[in-house]
Amino acid sequence: PASGRLAAMATQCVQAVGAAGADAKIAKGTRDYGPQEMRVREPVFAAIRSVFKRHGAVEIDTPVFEHRDTLTGKYGEEGAKLIYHLADQGGQLLSLRYDLTVPFARFVASHGLDKIKRFHIARVYRRDQPQMTRGRYREFYQCDFDIAGSHALMVPDAEVISVACEILGSLPIGDFQFKLNHRGVLDGCLELAGVPSGKVRTVCSSIDKLDKEPWADVREELVGEKGVSPDVADAIGRLVQRRGEPMALLAELESTSVFSGSDKATSALAELRVLFGYLEALGCLHRISLDLSLARGLDYYSGVIYEAVLLDGAVAVGSIAAGGRYDSLVGMFSASGAKVPCVGVSIGIERVFAIVEAKARAADAATKALSRPPVDVFVAAAGGGVPLVERLRLCKELWAAGVRAETPFKEKLERRWLENALEAGYPYMCLLGESELAEGKVTVKDIANTEQVTVDRADLVATLSRFGVPVDAME
Amino acid sequence: PASGRLAAMATQCVQAVGAAGADAKIAKGTRDYGPQEMRVREPVFAAIRSVFKRHGAVEIDTPVFEHRDTLTGKYGEEGAKLIYHLADQGGQLLSLRYDLTVPFARFVASHGLDKIKRFHIARVYRRDQPQMTRGRYREFYQCDFDIAGSHALMVPDAEVISVACEILGSLPIGDFQFKLNHRGVLDGCLELAGVPSGKVRTVCSSIDKLDKEPWADVREELVGEKGVSPDVADAIGRLVQRRGEPMALLAELESTSVFSGSDKATSALAELRVLFGYLEALGCLHRISLDLSLARGLDYYSGVIYEAVLLDGAVAVGSIAAGGRYDSLVGMFSASGAKVPCVGVSIGIERVFAIVEAKARAADAATKALSRPPVDVFVAAAGGGVPLVERLRLCKELWAAGVRAETPFKEKLERRWLENALEAGYPYMCLLGESELAEGKVTVKDIANTEQVTVDRADLVATLSRFGVPVDAME
């Protein structure tokens, strides 16, 4: 009992310390986005939206939490452990979304759609071990593009990959490659190697580690932990370690009849041939590496699967985009069981930002673009006789005309405010002196061009506009 | 034991039924935003951002969940019950944000800021009784604008109110009014009426209901449930039921010396006089009604408080914007206890959308603006001899030039596809026939102007651009 009491006291101490320090802290694995981060992110999001819209995708949004049942059984052995659950507060059992794909399938079923091409930019939640420096968070943005509906074979698949290539190719992140495989080919590999059907999923989740671990380690896991016989493991190794230029590898696989014993694999290879033809027409076949070891851990994939990685070895951020075909997921949510085939891609934008932000910060040291003032016009008073309320009145005139403007919230403007404003880099200034105020005039300064003019208040906005100040600025 | 087993079976049945039906359903009180809703919302958000930026605010974002300690004790008696908690999955105790104000104060403290003018557009979470038709959800957007830092008295308060007026005034929601009060005036009312200090908070939360309930009901609650003596209740009633045009009511309160017995109230009235002067200069004093019954349920307010309501009685959506001054909140999160005074406003945009969406839908019946095709160019083939891959190749050329384009994912395009495209309202069409394909040409149609021209493929983008198609479209 004494040791019990001690343990309880120790727990209380730890809780007290935790509580005292926790208040100003942020939840583990999450981050704030300050003004500078937002300035970097905003144009990247805008560029991504613009590509999505160019391809005719419409935007949707879904709730951040879903019924727990909607999410369970969709993310494989590893994923299931990482879902955030809400406390049962006497209502429904809810969980935070783990990705945007399952909510999308639920959306398609809920609204009884038979086709849609949509994009969705939103945050998802995973109770993973955060690695902030590598852009790995527990709360992070995904930018998803998906095509639902029955369409000509492999055409939506090709467009989805092409959209991802357009986006990644437009970002300053260096060269990248799509590793691509087909669930039918992978199933064929396991079938031919003699993996019993009950072990297919667990074997897949070992193979999935081949991007991070050498074959020897994966083989050991298969034989040692998962009870696969050494012969079967070696057969798996021979099959799944093939990778290379898509057309050449496809020709080799077909000519050597490696997969002739598996109908699944044979028909998957035929689909890949069609896909590669379209990817060639869309100018992105050179980005593809056919990689028979790619497994993708999620349960819902049913056809082609892919994952983009950066080729610049210096930046170890893992995959920066991933996706695949999932033809049965919508049917799982549909009351009538109606199947709506789908294919999509998710841009792992957080990892992209980890790279873009570092570059922007480096550039900012020179250009100060990230720390420029947030408005175009600084409103100042010359001399002590102009009260703050008159500066506000002037701001009001500018705001009403859509001009971005601000004035310091100080009764008296000392000389150093003017100096600070010049140093901060405001491009324009409006100056009110006592005589200007009496005569209904104002002085406008174009700071970069050291030009200045005193005009009637009624002509202020027109003057600023002539100087190049954005007026009626939307954004 | 038999009845126990029966109860257990009944529970299982209920759970099974729940699970079967729940899959395609959305969590209670939440909603999907489909393409049409997003089309309505996007320009509204853009307009709001534009006003925030015009006033020099920078954008931030914070995580959707915070440490539970960060949120507790900030939202009053009623609010505390409505916070969504995350399940304790062997980590920290976390809760979903209830508003954007407390996370903002935590942000200011976490980053050691002494001033910032920021906006934040994001979703917040309240386990309230949803009333969807009135725009009341459990997950909903707020658009917040706040000014932190020590500034000239009441100037930031005036700018915050002015920003809210600019935004609400620019939205098609009809006339609105800001009810405004000061916590110091309210405290003075309770002090003068003789409310014991231990009952101040609970009395305030009754007074807060005066916007929905008549005084007689509130009085009954005070006397019957909260143990306030009838005399004290009547004294409260006489004081807090005053409302009216700000300058006139202020003059009346000052001349009749109603509050001369309360230092708190007297100094609050002096602050209001300063505020009204600035609001007059900013052109929005006519929007204000000084209303001594306004209490605002939240714990953190310390000065002026306000709440905007629509004046068109037909639309009962409750308050559409609200805020106030909270000078002690940042200090609660700061390790050094450093105080950073703050004032802000939150636009309850969901209620605004409930109105805007209804109007947009009504207008759409005539204009079809919401259901127009998502791209500018429809790519089609004339005759059966042009394979789908050639249409894709043409799309690729358009996408690469930043043109919004799409083609049906069908091997063969029947005549009805062309008819459908015309009916859907695509403004432009690119047509590939066999002879065009052979000669490296393409036909471009301007559908509205029934104009068409056949050009070299190399001149396609220039031709579209001349026709008025947006090229290199960012958004």
Image (spheres, coloured by chain):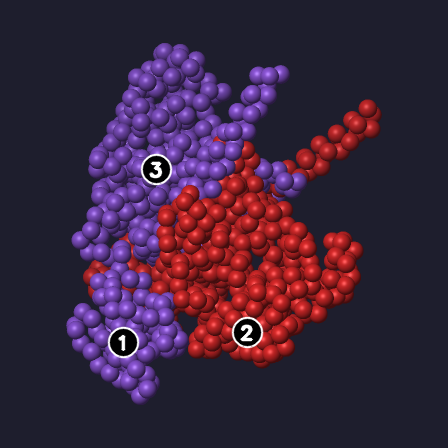
Chain colours: A red, B purple
As measured in the structure, the alpha-carbon distance from the residue carrying label 2 to the one carrying label 1 is: 32 Å
Q: Which residue is mark 2?
A: A288
Q: Nearer the viewer's eye, disc 1 or disc 3?
A: 1
Which of the numbered marks, if any, corresponds to residue B132? 3
User: Which amino acid type is shown beneath numbered disc 1?
Assistant: Ala
Q: Residue at x 59, y 76 (%)?
A: A254
Q: State whether residue A165 is above or below residue A233.
A: below
Q: Secondary structure at mark 2?
A: strand
**In this orientation, which residue lies closer to the viewer: A397 or B450?**
B450
Badge 1 crowding class, 10 Å Cα cut-off, few under 14, some 14 to 19, many 20 or more, is some
User: Which amino acid type is shown beneath numbered disc 2?
Assistant: Ile
Callout count: 3
Kindly indicate whether the residues beneath marks 1 and 3 are on one polypeptide chain: yes
Q: Is residue A246 left or right of residue B195?
A: right
Q: Which residue is mark 1?
A: B382
Q: Secondary structure at mark 3?
A: helix
Badge 3: chain ID: B
